[in-house]
Image (cartoon, rainbow, N blue to C red):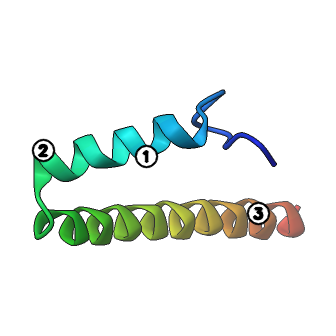
Amino acid sequence: MNTLLFLGNLGTGEIIIIAIVVLLLFGGKKIPELMKGLGKGVKSFKDGVNGLEDDINGTSENK
């Protein structure tokens, strides 16, 4: 897989440059906190989607 879904046609060099810019902007101490928050957000989103799927499946079985 040459490209990531959300990054389009960015190559390895561009991703490295973006990572360096993010490191310079936020600093080394802030990045783990940002990633932890992002992970919690993704987990919460997945839990919400699974809850909706369970609700949909539950109501369709009752009909």
Name the quarter where the C terminus is drawn. bottom right
Q: Residues within 10 Å of mark 1 (few under 14, many from 20)?
A: few
Residue in view at x 48 percent, y 60 percent: 45
Can you identify the residue that label 2 sits on? 25
Given the image, on which type of amino acid does mark 3 rest?
A: Thr
In this view, the residue in front, 36 or 2, is 2
In space, the residues marked 3 and 1 are separated at their CA atoms by 48 Å
User: Closer to the N terminus: mark 2 or mark 1?
Assistant: 1
In this view, the residue in front, 44 or 59, is 44
- Which is in the foreground here, disc 2 or disc 3? 2
Task: Determine the secondary structure under disc 2.
Answer: helix
- Which is in the foreground here, disc 3 or disc 1? 1
Task: Determine the secondary structure under disc 1.
Answer: helix
Q: Residues within 10 Å of mark 2 (few under 14, many from 20)?
A: few
**For residue 5, what is the image quadrant?**
top right
Can you identify the residue that label 1 sits on? 16
Can you identify the residue that label 3 sits on? 59
Residue in view at x 88 percent, y 69 percent: 61
